[in-house]
Amino acid sequence: PLRIVLPALPVAELEKNRFFLGKMAPETVFYRPQLDRITKAKLRLAAGESSVGQPARQATVQLAEGLEFALLDAPGNHLGIGEIDRFAPWLKAVLADA
């Protein structure tokens, strides 16, 4: 099985991350997109500007590079959380442009 080593964290954070990384990460880490379908779809690839260096962003960076798509920098982290005042209008503009 996949073993993810966590950095030193407070106990409450460590337990929360054990769940997310143990139950959720394997599904996304080993996901292989159907590239032929993606290239036919009209989509935008975005990653949170404050998630630079994080695995969630790196996966999107690599997908964008592989598909030769532009990568949009979204306000906030990889979920758009924490910057809702900036994220909501940004997302609205991106969707309007689609």
Image (spheres, grey):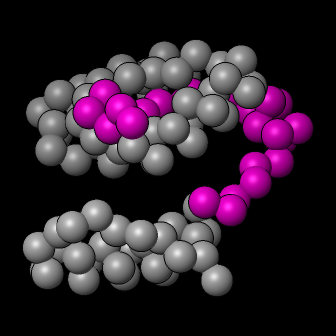
Q: Is residue 79 visible?
A: yes
Q: Is residue 3 left or right of residue 9?
A: right
Q: Is residue 34 magenta?
A: yes
Task: Pick whichever, 40 or 28, lies toward us.
Answer: 28
Q: Position of residue 22 (x, y in %)?
A: 46, 79
Q: Residue at 38% across / 23% down in the picture?
A: 73
Q: Is residue 88 visible?
A: no
Asked if residue 5 is positioned above or below residue 79 in the image, the reply reads: below
Q: Residue at 80% across / 30% down in the picture?
A: 39
Q: Is residue 31 magenta?
A: yes
Q: Is residue 21 left or right of residue 75?
A: right
Quarter of the C terminus within the rendering: top right
Farthest right residue? Answer: 36
Q: Residue at 45% across / 21% down in the picture?
A: 72
Q: Position of residue 74 (x, y in %)?
A: 34, 28
Q: Is residue 52 left or right of residue 9?
A: right
Q: Residue 5 appears in which quarter of the rendering?
A: bottom left
Q: Position of residue 2 (x, y in %)?
A: 60, 76
**Residue numbers of the magenta segment:** 29-53
Q: Residue 30 appears in which quarter of the rendering?
A: bottom right
Q: Is residue 19 left or right of residue 12?
A: right
Q: Residue at 74% across / 27% down in the picture?
A: 66
